């Protein structure tokens, strides 16, 4: 499982002209990709890491500050561009498996007390964000 976590002052996801998920205060925008071999255990670990990741101002995390997360599915994080000019998607999980694990990460974050907004899985989304810093890290489990 792979995520790009960006510290933002605000972020939103729009589908068909309608905002489907947003955070309107400082927090994390998380682009989450699911690998073909990922498991529920990895989803739980990813949720913990994202919630406790100390990249907010003053080395705070969402867990310690109560900052929100906007989590957006992003299968393209597993695009392999080493050969040719067209990415290969063979390492990205199939949609049904990816949705189940994406939902597990979100559910685990909420069980931990996190405030979580999401995009719409599988939809063509417009993601808007105001990066803070910018401060962006790659998280892998």
Image (cartoon, helix red, strand yellow):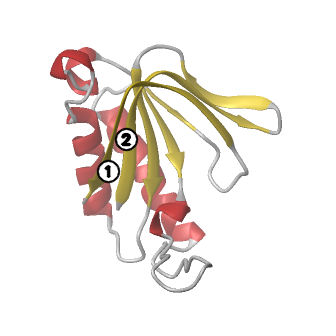
State whether residue 95 is above or below residue 105: below
Disc 2 crowd rating (10 Å Cα; few below 14, some 14-19, many 20+) is many
Residue in the image at 32% along x and 50% along y: 138
Q: Quadrant of the C terminus?
A: bottom left
Residue 35, placed above or below residue 54: below
Horizontally, residue 45 falls left or right of residue 132, namely left
Mark 2: which secondary structure? Answer: strand
**1 vs 114, nearest the viewer:** 1
Q: Judge left or right: residue 109 versus residue 97.
A: left
Residue identified by numbered label 2:
5
Q: How many marks?
A: 2
Q: Which mark is residue 128?
A: none
Identify the secondary structure beneath mark 1.
strand
Most foreground residue, 37 or 129? 129
Q: Residue at x 49, y 72 (%)?
A: 93
Q: Earlier in the sequence, mark 1 or mark 2?
A: 2
State the residue in front, 113 or 16.
16
Position of residue 42 measured from the top left corner of the image (x, y, whole percent): 27, 61
Q: Residue 79 location in percent, x, y?
A: 51, 71
Residue where numbered disc 1 is placed = 138
Q: Where's residue 87, x and y in %? A: 57, 76
Tell which residue pokes out farthest to the bottom in this image.
83
Residue at horizontal 29 percent and vertical 51 percent from the top: 139
Label 1–label 2 contact, CB within 8 A: yes
Does 81 sit left or right of 115 as displayed? right
Placement of the N terminus among the 4 image quadrants: bottom left
The x and y percentages for residue 7 are 37, 29
Instruction: Say which of 110 and 19 sits in front.
Output: 19
Give residue 51's quadrant in the image: top left
């Amino acid at each position: 499982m792979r995520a790009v976590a960006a510290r933002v002052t605000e972020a939103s996801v729009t589908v068909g002209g309608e905002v489907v998920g947003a955070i309107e205060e400082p927090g994390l925008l998380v682009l989450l990709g699911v690998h073909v071999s990922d498991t529920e255990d990895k989803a739980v670990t990813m949720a913990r890491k994202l919630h406790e990741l100390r990249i907010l101002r003053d080395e705070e995390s969402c867990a310690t500050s109560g900052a929100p997360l906007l989590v957006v599915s992003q299968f393209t994080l597993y695009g392999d561009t080493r050969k040719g000019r067209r990415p290969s998607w063979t390492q990205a999980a199939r949609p049904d498996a990816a949705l189940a694990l994406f939902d597990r990460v979100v559910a685990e974050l909420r069980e931990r007390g996190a405030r979580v907004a999401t995009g719409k899985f599988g939809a063509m989304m417009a993601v808007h964000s105001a990066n803070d810093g910018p401060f962006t890290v790659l998280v892998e489990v």
